[in-house]
Amino acid sequence: MASYTLHRSPIPPEMTDYIIDHLHDDTPALGACALVCRSWLPAARFHLFSSVSVHPWKKDAFLALLASSTQGGPPRLDSFASSVRHLYIREGRGAFEWEQKWLSTGLPGLCASLSLGALESLEIEQVTWEFLAAAARRALIEHFAPRVRRLKLRQFEFRTSADMVGFLSRFERLEELRLDGVRWERETVAGELEELEAVGAVAVPRKLEVLGMNYGRKGPVLEWMMSASGGRIAQAHSVRLGMVTARDTPVVASYLKELGSSLRELHLHFGTEFYMEQANLVEQFDLSANTNLTAVHIYDLVVDAQAPLPWVTALLRQIKSYRIRQVSFGLQMSCAERAEAVDWAGLEKVFKGVNWAGLEDVKFLISSNEADCQCAMARMTREKMQDLEKRGVLGVEAGLADRSML
């Protein structure tokens, strides 16, 4: 019978960990490292399973793999599940055999099998909260809410806005909250929110740093953020708001003002009302209280002769922070002739202000269906923004602005 001798690796474990860290995005190489020896396995597994996505069409294989790692008992410490730091879960739409709804039956088992010691980030998509079984709801809250620091909901629907607030308030350790297409059937009626408050179910995350919302009402979320007792609102440092509408403008303005000096980075994307109402809506904002702002990004500004953009300049004039380093604009246009809708002179005057002296990067992202228009607009931008060009801080690029925002 052949005999084998176990040899220790001559390389110190700190060095092998360092080497494997450099392979963090090379899945085949990490797989090979995991098979070299037992001492290499933890570092390789740390990267291989740091982010796991569970889609409807592969959830059976994933649940079977989890079951094999637990073997009917509690999760072992050496299970791959203990390495999962980001978990993405997608509910099926139920319209196809290969994409059946599964969370009501599968989520309790998934939560029971996962070792959540390393889990920090949770992303859930395509869920209707009311249709989830009670056991699945309970598992989601009990297993994830106490641990998750980064939460993202996409295409998530609640029965009422109070239901949404009640769900979100269970994640008290949140540092990042991103809501994309989150909606509800009806607004909260009198008494529903009071019932939640009576049982202490509307606590705001005290350590929140990033708040992002896109495609959906902003009001109920921001009102919840400002509802903390003792005036201690969720002090987000980075706020990303997509599709700001006239209906949400007052509460958005109030929230930004309440944030005051804690706000560092602001991303805004405005609805069509701002182009029609012009300064009438932006006058509701007051960014003068955000004295520590370092970056402002405004996305997808539609440049049209019928809808000039002097309100953008008016918004920037409100900023009194001396820490501003980055500004970017996303401009959409059909032809270069529309460019006069931009208040070029006003923008250049704003950037000459003393509080803008520390600018390091001013970027214009220009998008058009016509390549000639993009080139002409790029040249015009450099001509109009000569002062920024001389300061060496102007950047002009062709293409769509970052629409992900979140």
Image: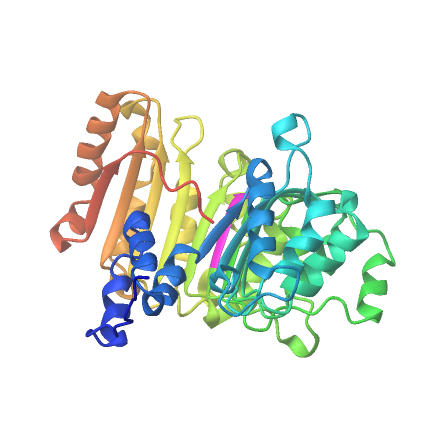
Asked if residue 215 can be seen in this view, the reply is no
Looking at this rendering, what residue extends furthest in the front direction? 1
Q: Nearer the viewer, residue 6 or 142?
A: 6
Helix, strand or loop: magenta stretch: strand
Spot occupied by residue 217 in the image (x, y as percentages of width and height): 64, 46
Residue under the image location 16 percent in, 38 percent down: 383
State the image quarter where residue 198 is shown.
Answer: bottom right
Residue found at x 25% / y 24%: 373
Q: Is residue 241 magenta?
A: yes
Identify the residue at image location x=86%, y=55%: 190
Residue 250 colored magenta? Answer: no
- Report the front residue among 251 and 194: 194
Give the quadrant of the N terminus.
Answer: bottom left
Side of 389 where 234 appears, left or right: right
Horizontal side of 217 relative to 52 (left or right) equals right
Residue pictured at 62% horizontal, 53% vertical = 250
Check the image and report above or below for 346 versus 286.
Answer: above
Q: Position of residue 371 (x, y in %)?
A: 24, 22
Question: Which range is magenta?
Answer: 239-245
Q: Does residue 113 lie above or below 394 as drawn? A: below
Q: Is residue 131 visible?
A: yes
Q: Which color mode does the image show?
A: rainbow
Residue furthest toward the left?
390
Percent coordinates x, y for residue 204 in the rendering: 65, 68
Q: Quadrant of residue 374?
A: top left
Residue 131's quadrant in the figure?
Answer: top right
Count of numbered badges drawn on the protein:
0
Residue 324 lies left or right of residue 247; in this view the side is left
Q: Position of residue 173 (x, y in %)?
A: 59, 70
Q: Nearer the viewer, residue 327 or 46?
A: 46
